[in-house]
Amino acid sequence: FTQSPWLNYKNYFNVFAIRVVSAQSGTKHPNTANDCSTDPVPVSNPNTYFGCSFDAYGIHRLVVAEKASNIANVLLNNFPNYDQAFIIANSIYYGGSGGDFATSTIQSNSNEISAHELGHSFAKLIDEYYAGDGYSQEGIDMTIQTDPSLVKWKNWMGVDEIGIYQHCCGGQSNLWYRPHNDCKMRYLNRPYCNVCREGLIEKIHSLTNPIVSYSPTTLEVNSNNKILLFRLKEIMYPVPNTLNIKWELDGINILNNVDSVNIDPNNLSNSKHLLTATVT
């Protein structure tokens, strides 16, 4: 929550830590990946509750929790309504992964690794370095489309260096394109590009409604002479606030950017009327 867009939407999140005890401390390293020599890590096989291990899928730095059923049981018993789980692997060496359960070690770069991996797990962002043919697919920030008028991020073209940049190197990388050359989904310690920030924000909005509560809660109100108060009682505001509120009575705009409106039935005809509050 120190970086955008998590910082801007921190009011939309609840975060809970679930502490799980393992029989032994550490993270497994079977030393089976072909690239283990690039980042020497002691061979180890501790008995941990989630079974976090380096060398997943033949990639040394890919740390994955192998005991998925244990994760599922912990979440079921402690917080079944979770939207995103994040696993912290107890190792001082660099590693992490996306997938259903994002994972990071506690190495010095772990904050940035976490932000990158949550981009995968939470918003389904794709690596903007070329991870290999098996990881190539159409997504928020990856495409084979080269027409600027048709590319999925066409509305961002030319803004903050958003464009259509060819991937490199190896395999079929020449067929695939990314929106930016310096995004967090390519390099650590960079901001998310506009396209990825939008993807994260759209995911947030798919899970939460900025209108938390309103009154009255009934959808039909009958009255003769009483002044009626309609309120958006609680709204989750981003930081800074970028929400616009629009009140309409029978399709006619009557107020903007206020959280309540008074309606005098005496000023209305004796029939049904429709009051709408829209938050954008």
Image (tube, rainbow, N blue to C red):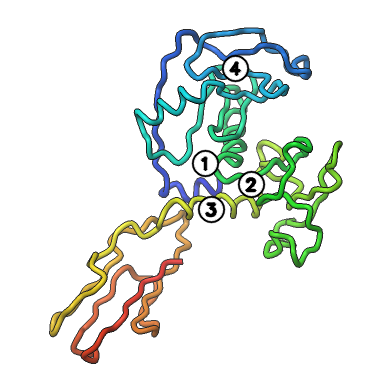
Q: Mark 4 or 3 closer to N-term?
A: 4
Nearest-to-viewer mark from 3 and 1: 3
Q: Which residue is mark 4?
A: 92
Say which of 243 and 67 sits in front.
67
Residue 197, how many percent across, how many down? 60, 51
Q: Which residue is mark 1?
A: 2
The quadrant holding residue 259 is bottom left
Say which of 212 and 101 sits in front.
101
Using the image, determine if residue 212 lies above or below residue 251.
Answer: above
Q: Mark 2 or 3 closer to N-term?
A: 2
Q: Which residue is mark 2?
A: 192
**Residue at point 48%, 34% (across, down):** 85
Q: Is residue 128 left or right of residue 98?
A: right
Q: Are marks 2 and 1 in contact (CB under 8 Å)?
A: no
Amino acid found under the numbered disc labelled 4: Ile
Residue 247, how many percent across, how many down? 36, 76
CA gap, disc 3 to disc 1?
15 Å
CA gap, disc 4 to disc 3?
31 Å
Q: Mark 2 or 4 closer to N-term?
A: 4
Using the image, determine if residue 143 lies above or below residue 38.
Answer: below
Q: Secondary structure at mark 1?
A: loop
CA gap, disc 2 to disc 4?
25 Å
Q: Are marks 4 and 3 in contact (CB under 8 Å)?
A: no
Q: Mark 3 or 1 closer to N-term?
A: 1
Give neighbour class at mark 2: few <14, some 14-19, many 20+ (Cα, 10 Å).
Answer: many
Amino acid found under the numbered disc labelled 1: Thr
**Residue at point 54%, 42% (across, down):** 122
